[in-house]
Amino acid sequence: MRKQVASAFAPGGALSAHIAGFNAREAQLQMAQAVAEVIDTPGSLVVEAGTGTGKTYAYLVPALLSGKKVVLSTGTKNLQEQLYFRDLPKVVKALASPLQLALLKGRSNYLCIFRLEQHYNHVPLQDDQLIQDLSLIKKWAAETQSGDIGELSYISEDSKALPYVTSTTDNCLGKDCPVYEDCHLLKARKKAQAADLVVVNHHLFFADLALKDTGFGELLPQMDVIIFDEAHQLPDIASDYFGENISSRILLELCRDIDVACKTELRDHPQLAKTADKVAQLIKDWRLQFSSEPARGNWREQYQKPEMQQALNRVVEAIDMLYLVMKSSLGRSDLIDNAFERLALGKARLQKLTDMQQTGVSLWFETSRLHVSLHLTPLSIADKFSAIVAENERSWVFTSATLSVNNGFSHYTAQMGLNNAKTLLLESPFNYAEQALLCVPRYLSEPHEQGMAKQLLHIAVRLIEANNGRCFFLFTSHRMLQLVAQQLPDLVRQPVLVQGSSGKRLLLEQFVKLDNAVLLGTGSFWEGVDVRGDTLSCVIIDKLPFASPDEPLLQARSEDCALRGEDPFAAVQLPQAVITLKQGVGRLIRDVTDRGVMVICDNRLVTKPYGEVFLTSLPPMRRTRSLEQAVQFLQQIKQDN
C-alpha cells in the first residue's frame, strides 16, 4: 500500500488533481506512510503531527486505500461533523473510493419518537419556552430522515426540551418500545454496521468499550483499523467510562417517568406516585448540602460530614421503599418495568459510591446549579486499555498536535498502556521564527497575588488597541475570566465576546464576522478552534494551565504516585499542563500566511526550572520579555496588510 499512498500524495496525483490548492508536505507523506505501515502490519502507532502537517489527509488516504473496515474516532461532535461532511467527501472523491461511509453519534443526539409522544402532553405548563421548543421538535420530527438533533439549529444547544425527546441507556425501552422499528438510533447503528468506515467520537467509543451501551458493541468486533484523532483527550475520557457515576438528574428523571406512567397507565396506584415524589424531594434536599455555586471536590471528604450522610441515607431509604412499592406493580406497564430496572441500577451505583474503603480509585463529586453527580474513577487505565489493544490483531493509530512532552512520548504511552507502540514526532511546517513572537512580559506579580487581574487588564488593553481587537484571551479559571469580563468592555473600544453568553459555535461566528473582536474563553476554547488569517493575530494566556491541586482526580493520582516513590509534580501535574498549554498556543498560527503574537502572563516560564520543559515543548517562536516589542510586532503586521 505504501506505493499507492505515495502516488496519491505525489504532484499530479489523485489529491492534487481533485482538491483545489492541495500541496503535499514532507511531514504529511511521512505520517501517511507510517499509518499505511501499521495498517498493513497490525500494531500501535502514536503520532504527534504539529499544526499544519495535514494529519487528517495523512490518515484518511491510507485508511480508504486499505479496503479494511475502519473506525475513525475524534474529540467532539463538531469535529466529527467536520470530518464527515467536509474532509471525507473530498478524499473519497479524489481516490474514487467505493467504500460505504457512516456517521454515528451517541444516543442523546437522536430523537426518541416514543419519548416525544409520551412527554408532549405532560410537561410543566408554566414553562413557555419548553412548550415552544417541544412544538418545534414535534414539527421537525415529521420531516426528518435521520432524527439527528444536530439538524435543530434553531433550538438552543442546552434547551430544556432535549432530555424529554431523547433517550438514555437507562430509560430506553429497547425491543419493548412500541416504535422500535422506526427508531432513529437503531437505523443509524444499522447503517454503521454495514459501513466500511464509521466516524464516531471518543465518548461513544469508550461508552461501548466500558459496556455502558448496547448496539455499537456489535460494530467494533468487525473493525480492523481504529484511528483516534485528538488522541490527547483519551486518558481522561477513558478514565470516566471505566469508572461509575450516578447523578441527581438521572434519579429525578426516573421519578418524573414514574409520575408520567402513573398519570397514563397506572392511574389506580396513587401510592407509587407519592413515593416517587418523596424520593424526588429528598434528592433535592441532598443537593442543598453542597455549596450553591457549581464545584468539584473530594467525595470521601464530603461524605465524612454527619449532615451529608444523614441527607444521603434518607435518599437511600426512600429509594428502598420505592423499590418495594414498584415491585408489586411489575408486569402491568412497560414503562414501570423499565423504570424498575433503572432504579435497581441506581441503588447498586449509590451503594458502590458510598463505599469509602475502595483503593485504586478516586471518589469525587461535581455540582451544577441544580444537580449533583458522584463519580468513581480508576487512577490508571493502562492495564485495562493495553489488554483491549492486545486482544485482537488490529491496527491502532493515536494522533494529535499535542501528545509529546519535552520531545518524548513516555508520559502518553505510560498513561494509555501502549508500551510497544511505534512513535513519530513531526514538526509543524510553519516558519514560527518568522510568523510568531512569544512574549512573557516583565514585572508581573505571581499568578496567585492580589494585583494580577489589574496587570492582566493593563497588558490586554495595550495589545487590543495595537491590534484593533482580533484577539483571544484564554483563562485557566472561570473566576479570573469573570473578573476581566466585568471590566474590559469599559476599557476598550472593540467588542468583547464572553464564553457562556451564547453557544460556542455562535460566539466563533460572531468573532470572525466582527473582525475586530476580543473573545474571552476558558477550557473549551483552548482546543478544537480554527480561526485562520488576520481575524486572529494575538492570543493572551493568563497563566500556565496547571490543574487546581484540589482537583479530585489529580489529587488521587498524585497521592498514588507519591506512594510509588515518584514525584507527583513531575509525573502527573507538569506533563498535563504542558499538553494543555500546547493546545492553547496552537490557536495562534493556523496557516502558512498567519502571523501573530503569543503572550503568556506567567513569570514562572522564566523563573522556575520547569519553565524550560514548557518552552522546549512549544513551537520555536522568537521570544521577548518586552511588551513594547510585542506591540510593535502587531503594528508591523497591520502595516504589512
Image (spheres, rainbow, N blue to C red):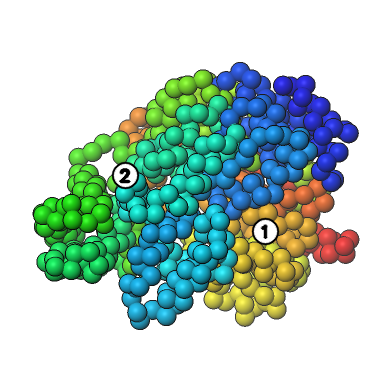
Q: Amino acid at mark 2?
A: Glu
Q: Residue at x 64, y 46 (%)?
A: 84
Screen quadrant of the C terminus: bottom right
Q: Residue at x 50, y 23 (%)?
A: 419
Mark 1 and mark 2: Cα distance apart in space: 38 Å
Q: Position of residue 383 (x, y in %)?
A: 39, 27
Screen quadrant of the N terminus: top right
Q: Is residue 541 left or right of residue 329?
A: right
Q: Residue at x 48, y 35 (%)?
A: 219
Q: Earlier along the polypeptide chain: callout 1 or callout 2?
A: 2
Q: Residue at x 78, y 38 (%)?
A: 94
> Who is closer to the viewer here, 435 or 7?
7
The nearer-to-camera label among 1 and 2 is 2
Say which residue label 1 marks.
539
Q: Which mark is residue 347?
A: none
> Who is closer to the viewer here, 556 or 211?
211
Q: Amino acid at mark 1?
A: Val
Q: Is residue 221 left or right of residue 17?
A: left
Q: Is 246 situated above or below 283?
A: above
Q: Secondary structure at mark 2?
A: strand
Q: Which mark is residue 244?
A: 2
Q: Is 458 situated above or below 198?
A: below
Q: Secondary structure at mark 1?
A: strand
Q: Is residue 636 left or right of residue 71?
A: right
